[in-house]
Image (cartoon, helix red, strand yellow):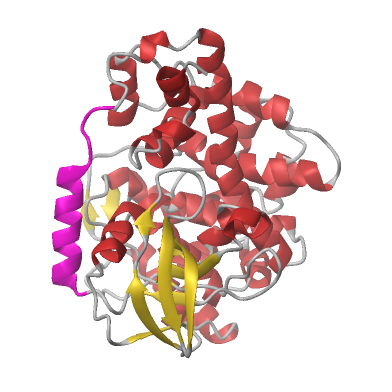
Amino acid sequence: MYEIVLHRIWESQNFPINALFTTRGESIHVVSAGEPNSLSGPDFHHSKIKIGDSEWSGHVELHIKASDWYLHGHHKDHAYNTVILHVVWEADTEVLRKDGTAIPTLSLSELVSQKVLNRVRKSTRQNIPKELACKGILSGVPDDMLNSWREELFWQRLEVKCSQIELWLHKFDNDWEYVMFKALLKGFGLNLNGQAFLSLDRALPFSVFRRLTPDPLALESVLFGLSGLLEEDKCDSSYFSSLKREYLFLKTKYNLIADACQHPEFFSLRPYNFPTIRLSQFAHLYHRRPNLFDQIRKADSLSSLKTLLHAQASPYWNSHFTFGREAPSGVKELSDTFKDILLLNAVFPILICYGASVGKKVHHRIKQWAEEMKAEQNKVIRIFKKEGIPSRNTLESQAIIHLYSNFCRKNKCLQCHWGSYLLYGK
């Protein structure tokens, strides 16, 4: 689900409008969905919504998850105090305004049919511009503005990730090792399996996980077992049998309940990103370094960070990607590129939050490390490269990805420093 799809659904009111209720059970009647806002602030202005017996005029804000309200810092922004309805796909938390009052929330995930969702997704893909609005004129932006806006975008992207870390720290009493565990668990799952991997935390107490770190087989067994990867009986390897036997023992010993865990996906993934490989590597990482955060916070170079993140899957996976099916032989260790992903999504945000908590500025060091890391290579990076804006390192490529996702795709040219300069010369 992408936010642009949610925007189209809300704008066209593509759901049963006569059966709407807030997450607290109050009836909702949409008098006017409002006008899309391409500038800063809430997504729809001048909306009119009747909630219960009261009719409200104001703004509507949309998010994939309700918790994105906090990730984007809206709880600190006065501009969002006039939001009268929070429209989300998944209502995973209650949301409060800056003054502490609850915002009525409408969840659409159970209201939008798959047929409508597919149609909107298809039309959205067709309508997404294949070229930048500033195509052909970006070379007119001065170098100092190019560099300053790129750096600001990089920090904006990291700030979003820091917001999630801050929420976890607040919820779990500043247990830094636990929050590092959660962030890396999600990171190992990437976009497709991040939430599925994170759901393991619901069934596997961190205290139990840490107790098992001396035994890599035990770690793998609970991660595989809770993920539903040991349910098949078609594999006759001794490794699989040992995992299953160990999991059944530990499940009973620690009263582990797998019902809350999502099963990870294999479809569309490259074999090296299969959940079997990534979970085995994750187990190996924590077997080697059970106090990982304590070591990471003391690291003084990019190379030392990457050394700390070294991990490889168990020997069985040298010749397999899935249970029971042989594959070309090769050690399955974390690549340098994958370590970069973990640094950006987990390690850097935690180091920033930790630095703030102890009064230590780490931004200069993280900027230096990001400039040492290789730039990502994808379609978005290539689009800007054709316009004379190459990405020479991770800081610049992350900035471009954030710019495209949050400004270009939403036609928010006036909020982009480059776009504003090209339009108004400032």
Answer above or below: position of 259 versus 66.
below
Q: Residue at x 39, y 71 (%)?
A: 262
Residue 330 is situated, as x and y percent measured from the top left of the image, at 33, 37
Q: Quadrant of residue 126?
A: top left
In the picture, measured across the screen, residue 366 lies left or right of residue 141, that is: right
The answer, for residue 378, to whether it is visible in the render is: no
Residue 151 is situated, as x and y percent measured from the top left of the image, at 57, 25
Q: Nearer the viewer, residue 206 or 241?
A: 206
In the picture, measured across the screen, residue 421 lies left or right of residue 160, that is: left
Q: Residue at x 77, y 37 (%)?
A: 298
Q: Nearer the viewer, residue 160 or 246?
A: 160
In the picture, measured across the screen, residue 200 lies left or right of residue 294, that is: left
Residue 315 is situated, as x and y percent measured from the top left of the image, at 41, 48
The answer, for residue 138, to whether it is visible in the render is: yes
Tell me if residue 333 is in the magenta stretch: no
Where does the magenta region start and end?
Answer: 113-132
Most frequent secondary structure within the magenta stretch: helix
Q: Residue at x 73, y 55 (%)?
A: 176
Q: Residue at x 56, y 86 (%)?
A: 255
Q: Nearer the viewer, residue 186 or 54?
A: 54
